[in-house]
Image (spheres, rainbow, N blue to C red):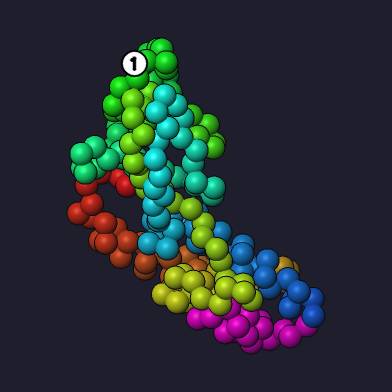
Amino acid sequence: MTYAELIAAIAAWAEDDSAELSTEIPQIVENAERIIFVDLPNLPAFRTTATGSLVQGTSTVAKTSGTRVTRAFYIVVSSNRIYLERRLDSYLDAYWPNPATEGQPKFFCEDDETNYRLAPTPDSAYAYGAYFTRLPTGLTVSNANTEVGDNYEDMLLKACMWETCKFLQFWEAALFWKEEYITEAAKIDPEIKKMYQNEAGVR
């Protein structure tokens, strides 16, 4: 379902072609996409990887903008991916109290909302990769297609209708569409679990 198809469907299902609703539809779509992201963060559409190179002697690595949940972090050593173990920042403090001392990283933590921290402090500019979830660019006039819109259009439309009815203050209809959305999301959840049932660890 493209953006144009979605906004046409919202107006048709709501039986409302007013300028007031038309103006609000971009925000309605964004709200619906955020609801789906919170409820089904492991949809393939929300999972991605960032790569780069560490800086020798620097223990922190900037997260990619928009990172919500980090699933794994690895470095490349002799062409092999070595996955670092996730630990609390207090563990890294105790394990590697002097960040000026360098070695091959074994552990990582989320230092704050914008950085990872590694221990030991990298002794080389290792290539790295981070698996994480993030809310991707949503449907807009300039972004006509997304994975959610193309592959989960029923769920997206129902989430949009829930948001539309809240905006229009049609509270009874809002409850109906909320239940419709929840039912649709519940159908997809087992599909996601089956998709990743053989995945080793949490990525």
Amino acid type at circle 1 is Tyr
Q: Residue furthest right?
A: 19
Residue 162 spot, x, y in % from top left: 60, 69
Residue 203 spot, x, y in % from top left: 32, 47
In the image, residue 199 sits, relative to residue 144, either above or below, namely above
The overriding secondary structure of the stretch rendered in magenta is helix
Residue 93 spot, x, y in % from top left: 41, 16
In the image, residue 67 sits, relative to residue 120, either above or below, namely below
Q: Disc 1 designates what residue?
A: 95
- The residue nearer to you, when weighing 30 against 70, is 70
Residue 77 spot, x, y in % from top left: 24, 37
- The residue nearer to you, when weighing 26 against 166, is 26
On the picture, is 144 further left or further right than 21? Answer: left
Which residue range is magenta in the image?
1-18
Count the numbered circles shown.
1
Identify which residue is drawn at 41% across, 12% down: 98
Q: Is residue 129 visible?
A: yes
In the image, residue 75 sits, relative to residue 148, either above or below, namely above
On the picture, is 185 further left or further right than 18? Answer: left
Element at badge 1?
Answer: helix
Identify which residue is drawn at 37% across, 62% down: 44
- The residue nearer to you, when weighing 103 against 160, is 103
Q: Quadrant of residue 14?
A: bottom right
Assess whether residue 3 is covered by the magenta stretch: yes
Q: Is residue 71 visible?
A: no
- The residue nearer to you, when weighing 26 against 78, is 78
On the picture, is 147 further left or further right than 105? Answer: right
Q: Quadrant of residue 124?
A: top left
